Amino acid sequence: MTSSPRQPTVAVAGGGLAGLAAGCALAEAGLRVTLFEKRPFLGGRASSYEHPGTGEVIDNCQHVLFRCCTNLVEFYERIGVQDRIRWYDQMTFIEPGGRASVMHTSPLPAPLHTVPSFLRFPFLNAADKLAIARALLPLTLTTQRDTGQPFAHWLEHYGQTPRAIERFWKPILVSALSEDLDRISIPYAAQVVRESMKSPAARHMGVPTIPLTDLYNAAGDYIRARGGELHLRSPVSTFQLEAAKAHLKFTAPTVLDPKFINKTSEREEAFDYLLLALPFDGLERMLPETPESAHLRELLSHFEGSPITGIHLWFDRQISDLDHAVLLDRTVQWMFHKSRLQPSRVLTGDGVKIERSYIELVVSSSKSLIEKSRADIVDLALGEVHEFFPAARDAKLIKSTVIKEVHATYSPRPGIDAYRPPAATLWPRVFLAGDWTATGWPATMEGAVRSGYLAAEALTYAAGVKDSKFLVPDLPATGLMRLFNMRLFK
């Protein structure tokens, strides 16, 4: 009787979106996956936890997706949480004072499907709209190269008005790329615009209806159901390669005595392969002292982080009937009405619904807030909320907190693509994943999932598992964008 072949073993360091996507793909391909995560929960920067100061389960920052994020959509379908995403085909822009404008789809073919609502925007005048249209044309019809100049320079070259920059380009691109316009690479800005215009469905926005960690726990279940293991509170410190094995050193909690649940011990375990799905700054600290590490360290030295700040406010009454909104001309860029987006957060007393508002405000590229105190940030945010939502002026603020992700994303500055490494490394048994690797996408959840799938494809090929393909095609262009894409890639 012949025994079945042994499953190759793989350690995945990092339980963020990149590591989870890679782990799920590798488990499906028949490898035995062991995933290590330093935190007590999954999701990485897209996670939630019980905040000790408020007693509330909060997301460390609001994350959204769009229909053009095909690999992220497929990942949610893979782990069975697609019904936990609520989709919106409208986007509301609010000016200080409360005037709202809604962008929605019309019957016109892409990329003209939002033109009617765009032309009716009262917060842009005719000169602004003409300038924007003049700039959108080359972004749609021509390939934009990295010239070393930032997108702000490109906008100046194409004659954008100050109002067009402040009220159109900044809300779209700073939120999408978490960087200031004078530090964004031209091709990344062009990609955001082109992907959102390629079909009416591309700009549909999805928002999770449950806390993020609850969403990604399904990925952990997916890995376990296929013979894998998860080790939480278990940061990887370093690794060594010997013969045909990768030896992983990590810290694990000691649970023999409940009185010492925070006690840890250093451990070492050998695997056939290692997949490092860590942020660029976390990876640098764990690399061994080898010539291969020197090359990777040199690439990593070119990366810079960009911060995102989430401001969580709880009011004693409803302050808006909107689920979300883009906020113009102030520090805060987005409002997400969590008590409306997540039904489980609706409070009840004696069976009677209590109308309260829990909102999360998001500031991308929040460099101006890093040195500010929590109290100062809450005061600033509260003042802006009163401007945008007049009903909030009569509401009482019950509690608040501020979450600063200082290195939330890598900065998509000009020239950075030259330093984004592929999934394969100079170590034959070690692979990389992370939104900062060479995915063809900027630092988004879609980019993170793509990196996980690309790393899984490279690793399974090295392991002799042929024809393992996980990356799914981009969203197809529709309408006139089909002709524009043919011209763009001819």
Image (cartoon, grey):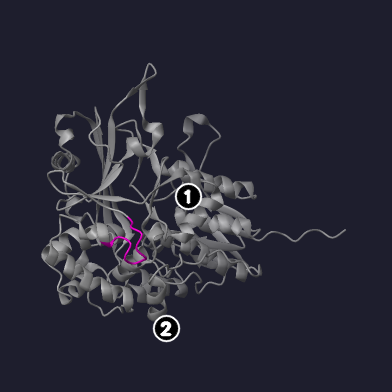
Residue in the foreground of this view, choosing between 347 and 92 = 92
Report x, y in % for residue 86: 41, 45
| Mark 1 Cα-neighbour bin, 10 Å: few <14, some 14–19, many ≥20 | many
Residue 356 location (% of width, % of height): 28, 29
Q: Is residue 215 left or right of residue 143?
A: right
Q: Who's the residue at 41% across and 50% down the image?
A: 44
* Residue 459 image-quadrant placement: bottom right
Q: Residue at x 36, y 39 (%)?
A: 341
| Range covered by the magenta-colored residues | 105-115
Magenta: main secondary structure: loop
Q: Nearer the viewer, residue 123 or 292?
A: 123
The three-letter amino acid code for the residue at tag 2 is: Lys
Query: What is the number of the mark on residue 490?
Result: 2
- Camera-nearest residue between 113 and 323: 113
Type of amino acid at the residue the image marks with label 1 = Glu
Please provide percent x and percent y for residue 34: 58, 53
Q: Secondary structure at mark 2?
A: loop
